Image (cartoon, helix red, strand yellow):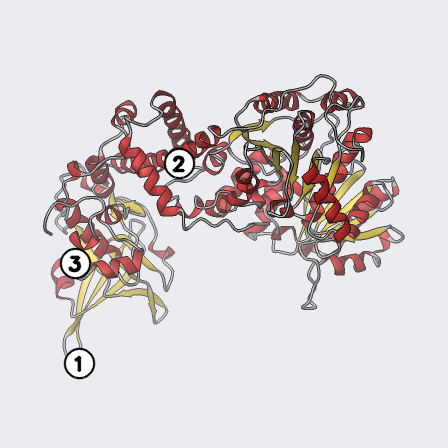
Amino acid sequence: MSGPVFPDSPLRMVVPKGQAPRIERAFGYRTAEDLMRHFPRRYVQLNDRYSLDELQVGEVVSFLATVLQQKERRLRQRGGFIVDVTVADQLGNTLQLSFFHGYLARRQLTEGTAALFYGKVTEFQGSKNMTNPEFEVIMTGDGQPVSSWGIEAEHPERMPLPLYPGSGEVSAFTMRRYIKEAFEAIDFSAWTDPIPEHIRREEGIPGLHDAYQSVHRPVLAADAEAGLRRFQFEEALILQGSLGRRRREAAQLPGIPAPRRSGGVLEAFDAQLPFELTEGQRRCGEWIAQDLERSRPMNRLLQGEVGSGKTLVALRAMLQVADSGAQAALIAPTEVLAAQHAQSLRRMLGELAQDDLFTAGDQSPNVKLTLLTGSMKTAERRQAMLDIVTGEAGIIVGTHALLSEKVSFLKLGLVVVDEQHRFGVQQRNALRERYTPTPHMLVMSATPIPRSVAMTVFGDLELTVLAGLPGGRSPIETYVVPTQRGPEWINRVWQRAAEQISQGHQVFVVCPEITNEQGSLDASVELISQRLQQVEQLAGARTAVAHGRLPAEEVAETMRAFEQGRLDVLVATTIIEVGVDVPNATTMVILDADSFGVSTLHQLRGRIGRGTTTTNRCFLVTRLPEDHPSVQRLHDVAQHTDGMHLARLDLQRRREGDVLGASQAGVSKHLKLLSVIRHEEIISLAAAHIDTLFDRDPEWKTARELHQAVMAWEAEHSEAVDFADQG
């Protein structure tokens, strides 16, 4: 190793000659900092209680064990010898280790010695074992601690021992040795720290040298926790810095002020509402209205429970913009949902939705609503685009077709994005970036999002939570139906559905597939719709189907018929997940419910109980064994109606990256240490410091290193951003 080592110094400067390419192939590391941030995957202690019986044949593992006995046997035909070592865990479980020509094992692995072992678990004559595992002695047989780091611990049996991730090309023990050698050679005082000094002092955060030492060579468990927390905070600070910078850059763009107007269509709409707005709707509506009045563009996330009335809040915002003479566009992820939104908005507007020319000063307030989708007939599409470009359409509802450069708005004042998790970041901003002044942005999400996730995923948006549900919503009872218990279980479900139909109510049946091409007994829309005709309890029920492969006009007509009560049973896919409001629907049967995620099940369930009915039931039907983990997920949905609680349970089960990746491109795969659920407090703390920094030092003169880290992070991830549509 020659010359000083800096964070961006080539990896070859801190590892043995010729080893850098192997490490880069194994882990993608290229710099000294990359190596130092190869953090332990866990820590063990001499007095840990764990079980060697849990080791699985074929897996490569690290573990701590004590030598019970050592034996040596000669190889007669090939010469040489084998050292057989029996080791035991704290629970008394044993494992056989074999070392061919094991001179080092013979000398060091004596009875009573405690050591770390690393290798692949194999099987011989019905018993698990290891052949030639790597090892490192931690305590000799006479009780003397041995530390390759040279650390003196008051209680060596309590000292955390780091276990590192390894690969087939570079073992965990090899990485441990390289990290040790690099740590001893690096002068960390020459390394810049991204965390500003004043923040380190305020939070009691250790500097880089102490933090790396705490992580790689802790004396106590608390040392390792403090060191890791420091790097987690750094990651949160850089991420929040990037999101905060993006949010403030957007705030500097010129916007289109939309002041509230007396005698306008919004005032007329409020006057004709047959119900009172909820407290949450009034509060969120006022925040949004104030944002719309400003000359800088709004960039707000509206999050609410299923049925909380987000569409009504969005419509009132669109009417305020229409009153100002500008246009509002609502973008939905599918044509079916776009058509449902258009129909729902027309129903809410009533006589205010006219086909007359849109004029802000008309004595009779009204607004023209136009639908634009990709499958519209040529003449209809041409007329819709003409309405948009001339400004005749005050509210435009559409799909991704609205993102096309062929669609030109006369004066786009507000973009409302529904079901944000179905859109990538680039799509979310496509319309805003094409127009000057910049249109306001309102993003809606019916999927419950824990605050920490929202801060990480939607950190460039102002978060608005729409709390509460409209009055009159009825409770919903949810039941798990395990069909393995016998056919009477599903028969009872159909009987319950028939009872509701006989009382004049309606039923949703949700299937995970449209068609069944393999001929098995899958729960497809086509197969189930045929079988329901043969179910005795449902004989005579008026049944129809709806799914994404049908023409949009046909689906729209089916949905209208169901909403108007001309159908008893609707067999559909998850296209009914959002945007469907049928107060008379009291029963939902979700077949193969285990194939859906928790959020989707919660969304689907929200389609019933929207009226004043007293009996509302959701049946989660599954063919899986009752001890299957996916069935436990169904029981969670059945037991809890709080969407936020369910969202947390869902995140804890799944990889958080899957959740984040669909919403905030580039974030999911690059959160190395942070868990948005476990580290909510750290994320919140970092966000608060970033806000304070922007307020007190907008140019970041006191945080140059942090600014450089943020810019480097953005540059590193710009090409990895996946903007693909998730819908």
Q: Spatial distance from mark 1 to mark 2, Cα to Cα? A: 63 Å
Q: Mark 1 or mark 2: which is in front?
A: 2
Furthest residue in direction bottom, as rendered? 77
State left or right for residue 172 relative to residue 182. Answer: right
Q: Nearer the N terminus, badge 1 or badge 3?
A: 1
Furthest residue in direction right, as rendered? 540
State left or right for residue 55 relative to residue 515. Answer: left
Q: Nearer the N terminus, badge 2 or badge 3?
A: 3
Instruction: Verify CB contact (< 8 Å) between mark 1 and mark 3.
Output: no
Furthest residue in direction front, as rendered? 390
Please tell me the numbered disc located at residue 680: none
Name the kind of residue labelled 2 in the image: Ser
For label 1, the residue is: 78
Dot 1 falls on a residue whose secondary structure is loop
Instruction: Return the x and y of residue 561 as percentages of the image width and height.
Output: 84, 45
Instruction: Return the x and y of residue 390 as percentages of the image width and height.
Output: 70, 37
State the residue at coordinates (29%, 60%): 25
Instruction: Return the x and y of residue 723 as percentages of the image width and height.
Output: 50, 49
User: Image quarter for residue 613?
Assistant: top right
Q: Nearer the N terminus, badge 1 or badge 2?
A: 1
Q: Work out whether residue 107 or residue 639 is closer to the camera in this orientation and state it.
A: 639
Asked if one can make out residue 231 in the rendered structure from this viewpoint, the answer is: no
State the residue at coordinates (65%, 30%): 326
For label 2, the residue is: 242
For label 3, the residue is: 109
Dot 2 falls on a residue whose secondary structure is helix
Q: Mark 2 or mark 3: which is in front?
A: 2
Dot 3 falls on a residue whose secondary structure is loop
Asked if one can make out residue 118 in the rendered structure from this viewpoint, the answer is: yes
